[in-house]
Image (cartoon, grey):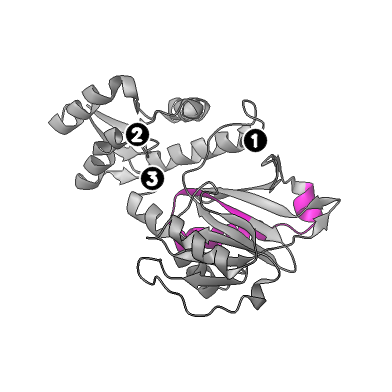
Amino acid sequence: MRYDLCLPWYWEYDEAFVGMVERACIEQGISLWQIKPDNLLESITALYKGVLTFKTLLHRGQGEPAFDPIPRWALEYGAKRINPAEVSAWSEDKATMHLELINAGLHTPHTILLAPFLEQPVVAPIDLTPLGESFVIKPSNGGGGEGVILGASSIEEILQARMEFPEQKYLLQAHVTPRMIEDTPAWFRVFYANGETHPCWWDTSTHIYANVTAEEESQYRLGRLRDVTKRIASICKLDWFSTEIALADEFVVVDYVNDEIDTRVQSQALDGVPDEIMESIAKQLVKITKENL
């Protein structure tokens, strides 16, 4: 038997998102194969014996090595992979994306790139003046804020930071101060899925989202958020991701590409993604599946 869509997952907080995918599959007449820890062994066995196969993979089993044979099978047998691992790895490299976005004419924070400690243990003298009094230090492949140092101000902090992830490049970035719009910092996270964009106000301290309404988009000329996000999509080639954009003098892409989206929804977690956005994302991912039949 061949399923249209295979969805491996194990994180309990993915449950609401999986339910949205399941409903979208039912609406579109798409067969869904969920692979979870309780059926993982039998599913992988059936897959590699050819008893069960699939056309499209939406992989939420990242980080659990026991799930790795599933995307490996998909690659070997030419199944459609939503956000293929090699594309994700390339687009998640902040140093690479920084250069790609600049080449595409997008605005980013003033940034100094440093080679990995293992490649270049001693760095040449660095002029930190363009970064301002304090700046951000971040590893090129960190996620979820891991390894990020806010409010750094000295070369000593930089040298120490490079030791934490010695195999990674590092970025030194100037802080971006957003404009205020109706007493709210103009800081946004935009979700992208298969051509659709969903801009949200995003509070950097509480991580709470609020939809950018059509009225706000028109009144404050925020439509450029969609344009910038689609331009990023054309560069990174991912099917779905989020990006962080601040409005200062220009729209500045602050956190370039996050492809392993936290799918917790707002109805279940204060800092979750608005439910209607996640519902729309699920439908778009199922649309990719249908187009691959």
Q: Is residue 264 magenta?
A: no
The residue at the point 70 percent across, 40 percent down is 206
* Secondary structure at numbered mark 2: strand
Disc 1 to disc 2, C-alpha distance: 29 Å
Quarter occupied by residue 271: top right
> Disc number at residue 271?
1
Camera-near label (3 vs 2) is: 3
Q: Nearer the viewer, residue 124 or 217?
A: 124
> Which mark's residue is nearer the viewer, 1 or 2?
1
Name the one closer to the observer, 216 or 266: 266
The image shows residue 38, relative to residue 147, as above or below, that is above
| Magenta region, residue range | 215-244
**Distance of mark 3 from mark 1, alpha carbons?**
25 Å
> What's under tag 3, amino acid-wise?
Ile
Which of the marked residues, 3 or 2, is nearer the chain's N terminus? Answer: 2
Name the residue type under label 1.
Asp
Categorize mark 3 by other alpha carbons within 10 Å: few (<14), some (14-19), many (20+).
some
Q: What is the chief secondary structure element of the magenta stretch? A: helix
On the image, the x and y values in percent for residue 97 come to 48, 64
- What mark, if any, has residue 82 been given in the picture? 3
Question: Most extreme residue toward the right, as rendered?
Answer: 182
Q: Which mark is residue 5?
A: 2
Which quadrant would residue 274 be assigned to in this image?
A: top right
Q: Residue 112 lies in what quarter of the image?
A: bottom right
